[in-house]
Amino acid sequence: MSKLEQSIARAQEYLARFKDKPLLHLIDGKADAGTGTTFETLSPIDNSPLAKVARGTGAEIDKAAKAAKRAFLSWRKTTGEQRRELMHKIADAIEARAEEIAFVECMDTGQPIRYMSKAALRGAENFRFYADRAPQAADGLSLPTDTHLNYTRRAPIGPVGVITPWNMPFMLSTWKIAPALAAGCTVVHKPAEWSPLTAALLAEIALEAGLPAGVLNVVHGYGEDAGRALTEHPDIKAIGFVGETTTGSAIMAQGSQTLKRVHFELGGKNPVIVFADADLDRALDAVLFMIYSLNGERCTSSSRALVHASIYKEFAEKAAERVKKIKLGHPLDPATEIGPLIHPRHVAKVLSFADAAKQEGATIAAGGGASSLGQNYVEPTLFTGAHNNMKIAQEEIFGPVLTMIPFADEQEALSIANDVRYGLTAYIWTRDVGRAHRVAQAVEAGMVWVNSENVRHLPAPFGGVKSSGIGRDGGDYSFDFYMETKNIAIALGDHKISRLGV
Ligand code: NAD
């Protein structure tokens, strides 16, 4: 048996539990079939059904929200040390089941194992990071005046809703859920309908590790019914959402009646700006990695390469040569660099950009079509000779597709970089220190990397500006979202109080 065949056999063992009975919601610590209606999650490899999944409605959301509300009464009273201990146990259990999580994730999302094996471990790291911060979550500031001691305390906001997308479901779920639990909030999680399996594993792992019933609930289903009901539920105090910009707008409207606090991590059309003085070999490696890894289904992908005109031709030719050699294949094959995209509907969307590129007069320097490997496989694609007003330069494609645009000078690079509705990340390649700082400060993005691909540091803020998001995750920033800050003012003496009605 080849290594790939062995991995497929292992994956089938992990998936066997989903074959015979539907994957149910987890509400108040118990598996819950809800109304009994189900939907299918498909394997992107061949679009065959992997599992039937309970399809939640407003009724299951209501049940889960009420369970989260009940559980909040005791979970909020646990000490930070107790939450720390429990969350480390969850991290231990994630690590113990890392292979299962990674294999199931690959089969449900089509993401290559070379990235997913690390994603499971990163999920554990998210839990450990916030576990260690739980004891300080409620800490506030001391803000004294001559007459008063003002001090602040933070308290968990209440039961919260977490809504996640299909592209990196396990890692993103832990990224949102771990700080909520560390803060003392309880959670109702609505995973994406195209890749719900590992969210169920996470909830199961947490429960087995000792998380009390009702603290983490999972309701599966579609955005327009389960997702919508979660955002409208009066007992849910905040929505942590990762997904498309248009969905963020809908959630803001849906949550307005109940004054939901929202945190949005949305789409991107991120520029990587390559100046002529950069280390061009490293810049090319980073440009390619940041758009073609994770199937290009990555919010922080460098989907627009802005390259100085003096090096554009050579850089584009080298890029095209490399792109043509990127290896498509089965997600469980360790050699695979790009796997199948999530769903035929998404494939159609991604491929439609090749037509747009032709119509708009850009050059397809590599790829541009479907691959013969299977319905969901898309050739890694490079568009060159593009202008920033083209659709391929403005819209998020969310696939292995790079648009390369020349620029004449620093000013033009900046104006192209900023001329999009999005502002999540930006990447800058230059050896000129002054220019690196100037451009980093002027580019409209929540996160900027200079001479680097995306290297995350968990205490640092993560989030976007413009249509890429509202709010920041990471470090203490997540606690600001999941907690209410209270100011307490104590008079230090007999300060003057105006006397009325004397
Ligand atoms: P999506 O917005 O279609 O769906 C995300 C989630 O929202 C799903 O669980 C879906 O069921 C739910 N949903 C849909 N409509 C809803 C509604 N009306 N009310 C409540 N919930 C609803 O996004 P997607 O296609 O799953 O994911 C891809 C998008 O996510 C891309 O735009 C990508 O850039 C973005 N993303 C952003 C980040 C980030 O950190 N900024 C990270 C990953 C993905």
Image (cartoon, rainbow, N blue to C red):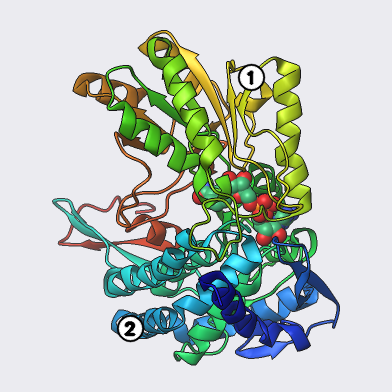
The residue singled out by tag 2 in the image is: 79
Q: Residues within 10 Å of mark 1 (few under 14, many from 20)?
A: some
Q: Residue at x 21, y 61 (%)?
A: 491
Residue 173 position, x and y percent, is 53, 66
Placement of 358 over or under 80, stated as above or below = above
Foreground of the two, 12 or 97: 12
- Determine whether the residue tagged by mark 2 lies in a helix, strand or loop: loop
Compared across the picture, whether 57 is left or right of 425 comes to right
Name the quadrant of the N terminus.
bottom right
Residue 435 position, x and y percent, is 26, 19
Can residue 266 be seen in the rendering of this structure?
A: no
Compared across the picture, whether 61 is left or right of 325 comes to right
Foreground of the two, 23 or 32: 23
Foreground of the two, 376 or 35: 376
Disc number lying in front (1 or 2): 1
Q: Which image quarter: residue 378?
A: top right
Compared across the picture, whether 26 is left or right of 41 comes to left
Foreground of the two, 42 or 332: 332
Q: Amino acid at mark 1?
A: Thr
Residue 478 position, x and y percent, is 40, 59
The residue singled out by tag 1 in the image is: 363
Q: Residue at x 64, y 38 (%)?
A: 397
Which mark is drawn over residue 68? none
Q: Amino acid at mark 2?
A: Thr
Residue 37 position, x and y percent, is 86, 78
Mark toward the start of the polypeptide (1 vs 2): 2
Q: Residue at x 79, y 71 (%)?
A: 40
Compared across the picture, whether 390 is left or right of 450 comes to right
Can residue 433 be seen in the rendering of this structure?
A: yes
